[in-house]
Image (spheres, helix red, strand yellow):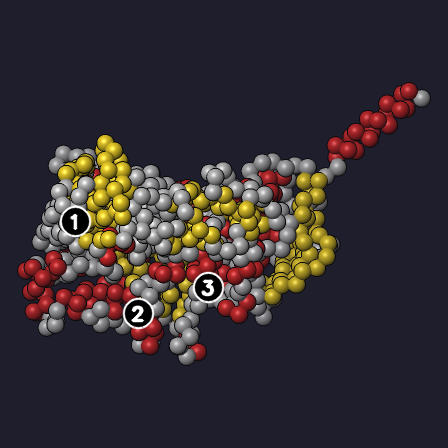
């Protein structure tokens, strides 16, 4: 009996060890399918699952997808050409090329499509039906994967669904580019726009012009990974004797490898070779095709002039033809992008070859000279049976006859082009530039020169309401663009990409009538869990409280909000972190003394988003009754955000001198304020600040000063704090003098001009 009992225990333990854990997914697909009906129950994918396909293309697609089970489970469903499986691939020639149908029942999964890409997209949806843990790297050999029953009929709204990656400003290697292609494919994006050349680096091997990578791919390293620093336009230029060490390029074999990888994911790769502007790296390598005053080195940061091809020299077009033909040999796709944007034509005005070209061709001006250049480049591209794409500046001086326009400066250029019969890709910066900030300016990393909120990206209408249905058909689609001036590493790339790429992907795939912001943000929560499993950095700005304020000279009224709806906001004023038990925000509240406001959003009593925290000083000069209009604006408790458009910044076009009077003699020992550094628009922090006090309002003595000569001449975008301390002094009047940088130093973007000063609240204690 004892032996029998032991035997039963062993059998029971073995059975328990063999029990599989069923992990269930949920229906939260991005982009949202056209039609979707959720059922009850689950289909279980396990070691015995069989996948039946009809042909070799289906087999290749299926094996690539189901091989992921090998990595996460240690086993893989079998894939073979048969009709006996419980996951069935079925060709349906009535479906459009990228369309698919996915029917999940408790006993079978049926996938229908007319092409390989349709089956591929069906599998991307199937993957999103799996539990988030399927996306992780941890081996889960004891798991059975539960797929919720659902019936999906799906197809894209637009044929062009793109993502642009700028690898010139910051270089990303082959494996990282493949990761980009992977996350594009999962979002059903099908056009990878590869920005390969710019002032700061040439990134692809051209064997007929080897110096493009020997010289043009490398610059002096002034990169920063500090997310509080934004100095793209303030980096030192290369000095004689300095060695360029930052950069890199893709060999032709690597280009072929990436193209093959993209093809497996049904993504076309569109190379962009920027011309005639944005070409400092090109001209550094081959100065003979440049203009007068061309910079002899690859740019270390932002440049806006002396960076163009020379349209007056025939050797320029010899170079362009040979180089572009080599590019087209590498990229076997329909489109070639030539940039054409932001071409500073000042060089052309003084270059003798450029001026001779204007004269010999009977051109009106430099704008028509740009059009002449673009049309000759288009002839080179058209001769290979390809189509040229350019940014909307290629409209200037007359549009090339067969060009496709990428509209980035709003929709105007795109509308103008399509009304002339040209195809258009809509990618306006205010909706599609995902290198811009995505939340409150003082709560986000200092990345991006402006702002694009997730809700704004999501709510974009790709086809403007003003167009007829016929005109609307010329809009090929939409694209997200990631310029990398401030994106120096992979973590920043993913942070700026997600979740806004999901919003733009849904704009490209899902019909406008089927979109819903609240539904989208709900689905994002599941997507965030998938990203967490992959250790991917992403932004939760839309789920994080904004802290807004309005000072009235006596108190600060604080209001809180989130982009995502349906969240509770909890806040504290005692410097503790908010919990679900903290004060719930319902209406704006006022503070009459210095406080740190901390706020956190909660959903179903669980924290979401990040902790938001801002301090609002209430000080001795609050609400002064005597002084200029500007001094009253500087003492009304309104603090400026890191946003040049914030009205709380008080601007002085020259040096600043302002005096404020207290209502009674007041003892003070410190004066502080923030200055806005936004040097692209001449806003520089003052080089020197002096503080004076008066006991009688007539005679002033200097209380303190600070000299910031070096700090004031740093280019970039930031808030610069000033604090001047001194011995405690009782005064009735306070005078502040601030001295502007004059002139703006040579080499700066606004060199020669006098700087302006922008400051916010003058805090006196």
Give yes or no for contact between labels 2 and 3 (Cβ–Cβ under 8 Å): no
Which residue is labeled 3 in the image?
459
Q: Decide which of 87, 440 is in the foreground and name it.
A: 440
Q: CA distance from mark 3 to mark 1?
A: 46 Å
Q: Can you give x and y, in whole percent of width and height, for residue 100 in the image?
A: 58, 63
Kindly report which numbered mark, 3 or 1, lies closer to the viewer in this rendering: 1
Kindly report which numbered mark, 2 or 3, lies closer to the viewer in this rendering: 3
Q: CA distance from mark 2 to mark 3?
A: 21 Å
Which residue is labeled 2 in the image?
413
N-terminal label among 2 and 3: 2
Question: Residue at image x 56%, y 56%?
Answer: 566
Q: CA distance from mark 2 to mark 1?
A: 45 Å
Disc marking residue 657: 1
Q: Decide which of 147, 462 is in the foreground and name it.
A: 462
With 394 as the anchor, is 353 left or right in this view?
Answer: left
Question: Residue at image x 45%, y 56%?
Answer: 454
Badge 1 crowding class, 10 Å Cα cut-off, few under 14, some 14 to 19, many 20 or more, is some
Badge 1 marks a residue whose secondary structure is strand
Kindly report which numbered mark, 2 or 1, lies closer to the viewer in this rendering: 1
Q: Can you give x and y, in whole percent of width and height, for residue 96 in the image?
A: 54, 68
With 714 as the anchor, is 648 left or right in this view?
Answer: right
* Quadrant holding the C terminus: top left
Disc marking residue 613: none
Residue 447 in sight here: yes
* Quadrant holding the N terminus: top right
N-terminal label among 2 and 1: 2
**Count of residue discs:** 3
Q: Quadrant of residue 365?
A: bottom left
């Amino acid at each position: 009996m004892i032996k029998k009992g032991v035997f039963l225990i062993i059998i029971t333990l073995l059975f328990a060890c063999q029990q599989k854990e069923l992990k269930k997914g949920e229906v939260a697909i991005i982009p949202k399918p056209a039609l979707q009906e959720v059922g009850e129950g689950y289909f279980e994918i396990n070691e015995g699952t069989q996948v039946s396909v009809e042909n070799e293309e289906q087999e290749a697609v299926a094996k690539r997808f189901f091989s992921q089970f090998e990595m996460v489970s240690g086993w893989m469903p079998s894939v073979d050409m048969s009709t006996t499986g419980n996951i069935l691939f079925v060709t349906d020639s009535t479906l459009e090329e990228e369309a698919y149908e996915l029917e999940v029942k408790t006993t079978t999964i049926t996938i229908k499509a007319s092409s390989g890409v349709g089956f591929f997209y069906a599998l991307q949806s199937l993957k999103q039906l799996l539990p988030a843990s399927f996306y992780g790297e941890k081996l889960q050999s004891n798991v059975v994967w539960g797929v919720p029953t659902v019936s999906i009929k799906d197809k894209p709204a637009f044929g062009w669904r793109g993502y642009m990656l700028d690898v010139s400003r910051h270089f990303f290697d082959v494996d990282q580019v493949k990761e980009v292609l992977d996350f594009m494919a999962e979002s059903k994006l099908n056009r990878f726009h590869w920005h390969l050349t710019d002032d700061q680096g040439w990134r692809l091997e051209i064997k007929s012009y080897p110096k493009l990578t020997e010289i043009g791919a490398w610059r002096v390293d002034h990169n920063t990974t500090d997310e509080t620093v934004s100095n793209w336009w303030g980096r030192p230029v290369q000095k004689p004797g300095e060695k360029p060490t930052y950069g890199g390029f893709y060999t032709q074999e690597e280009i072929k490898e990436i193209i093959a990888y993209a093809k497996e994911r049904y993504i076309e790769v569109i190379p962009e070779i920027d011309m005639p502007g944005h070409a400092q790296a090109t001209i550094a390598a081959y100065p003979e095709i440049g203009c007068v005053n061309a910079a002899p080195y690859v740019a270390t940061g932002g440049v806006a002039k002396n960076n163009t091809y020379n349209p007056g020299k025939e050797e320029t077009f010899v170079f362009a033809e040979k180089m572009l033909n080599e590019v087209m040999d590498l990229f076997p796709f329909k489109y070639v992008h030539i940039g054409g944007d932001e071409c500073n034509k000042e060089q052309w005005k003084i270059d003798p070859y450029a001026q001779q070209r204007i004269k010999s061709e009977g051109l009106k001006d430099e704008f028509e000279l740009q059009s002449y250049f673009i049309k000759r480049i288009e002839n080179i591209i058209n001769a290979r049976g390809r189509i040229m794409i350019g940014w909307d500046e290629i409209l200037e001086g007359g549009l090339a006859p067969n060009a496709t326009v990428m509209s980035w400066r709003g929709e105007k250029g795109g509308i103008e082009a399509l009304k002339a019969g040209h195809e258009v890709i809509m990618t306006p910066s205010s909706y599609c530039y995902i290198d811009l900030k995505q939340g409150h300016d003082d709560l986000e990393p200092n990345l991006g020169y402006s702002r694009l909120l997730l809700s704004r990206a999501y709510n974009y209408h790709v086809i403007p309401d003003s167009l007829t249905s016929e005109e609307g058909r010329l809009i090929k689609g939409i694209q997200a663009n990631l310029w990398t001036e401030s994106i120096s590493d992979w973590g920043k790339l993913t942070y700026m990409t997600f979740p806004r790429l999901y919003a733009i992907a849904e704009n490209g795939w899902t019909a406008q009538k089927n979109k819903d912001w609240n539904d989208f943000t709900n689905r994002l929560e599941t997507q965030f869990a998938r990203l967490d499993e992959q250790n991917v950095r992403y932004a939760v700005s839309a789920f994080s409280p904004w802290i807004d304020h309005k000072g009235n000279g006596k108190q600060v009224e604080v209001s809180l909000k989130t982009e995502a709806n349906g969240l509770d906001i909890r806040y504290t004023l005692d410097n503790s972190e908010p919990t679900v038990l903290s004060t719930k925000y319902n209406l704006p509240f006022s503070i009459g003394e210095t406080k740190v406001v901390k706020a956190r959003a909660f959903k179903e009593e669980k924290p979401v988003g990040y902790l938001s925290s801002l301090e609002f000083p209430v000080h001795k000069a609050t609400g002064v009754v005597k002084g200029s209009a500007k001094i009253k604006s500087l003492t009304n408790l309104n603090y400026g955000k890191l946003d040049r458009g914030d009205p709380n910044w008080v601007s002085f076009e020259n040096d600043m001198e302002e005096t404020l009077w207290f209502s009674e003699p007041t003892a003070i020992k410190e004066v502080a304020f923030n200055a806005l550094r936004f040097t692209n628009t001449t806003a520089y922090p003052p080089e020197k600040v002096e503080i004076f006090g008066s006991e009688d309002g007539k005679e002033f003595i200097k209380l303190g000063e600070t000299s910031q000569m070096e700090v004031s001449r740093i280019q970039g975008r930031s808030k610069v704090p000033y604090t001047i301390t001194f011995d405690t002094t009782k005064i009735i009047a306070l005078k502040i003098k601030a001295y502007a940088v004059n002139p703006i130093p040579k080499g700066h973007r606004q060199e020669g001009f006098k700087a302006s000063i922008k400051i916010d609240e003058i805090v006196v204690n």
